[in-house]
Image (spheres, helix red, strand yellow):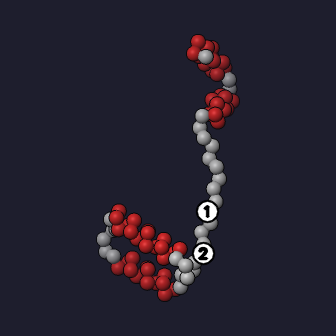
Amino acid sequence: MSSNIESIQNDIDKIEPKDRISVLLKPSEFVIPKLQSTQLTIPEREFTDAELDAETKRLYAKKTPLTDEEREAEITRLKKKLFEDD
């Protein structure tokens, strides 16, 4: 293959630009893994207006931006609240 690189390059150079892209991308299917579709099912939980108001007030009451640690803790807390069984 390496002895034919120059010949291959000459052949590729002769192809129309729009077709050249196809020729160059086609082998990538054998090298780059294809994405697979995934599905995520999240159980629904509705928050009451009072719960939403309380969360909104609590977040707006904080004057300084959250640190990375605080942000992660907040995400974890809200996930637990969202996914807890009633």
Residue lying farthest to the bottom in this orientation: 50
**Horizontal relation, residue 24 to residue 47: left or right:** right
Quadrant where the image shows the N terminus: top right
Q: Whole-percent x and y of residue 64?
A: 30, 71
Q: Nearer the viewer, residue 36 or 8?
A: 36
Which residue corresponds to mark 2?
Answer: 44
Q: Is residue 78 visible?
A: yes
Splitting the image into 4 quarters, where does residue 63 fall?
bottom left
Which residue corresponds to mark 1?
Answer: 40
Q: Whole-percent x and y of residue 84?
A: 52, 77
- Amino acid type at circle 1 is Leu
Which residue is depicted at the point 66% across and 18% down? 11
Q: Residues within 10 Å of mark 1 (few under 14, many from 20)?
A: few
60, above or below 2, in the image: below
Contact check, label 2 and label 1, Cβ < 8 Å: no
Q: Nearer the viewer, residue 82 or 66?
A: 82
Disc 2 to disc 1, C-alpha distance:
12 Å
Q: SS of the residue at dot 1?
A: loop
Q: Whole-percent x and y of residue 46?
A: 57, 80
Residue 53 image label: none
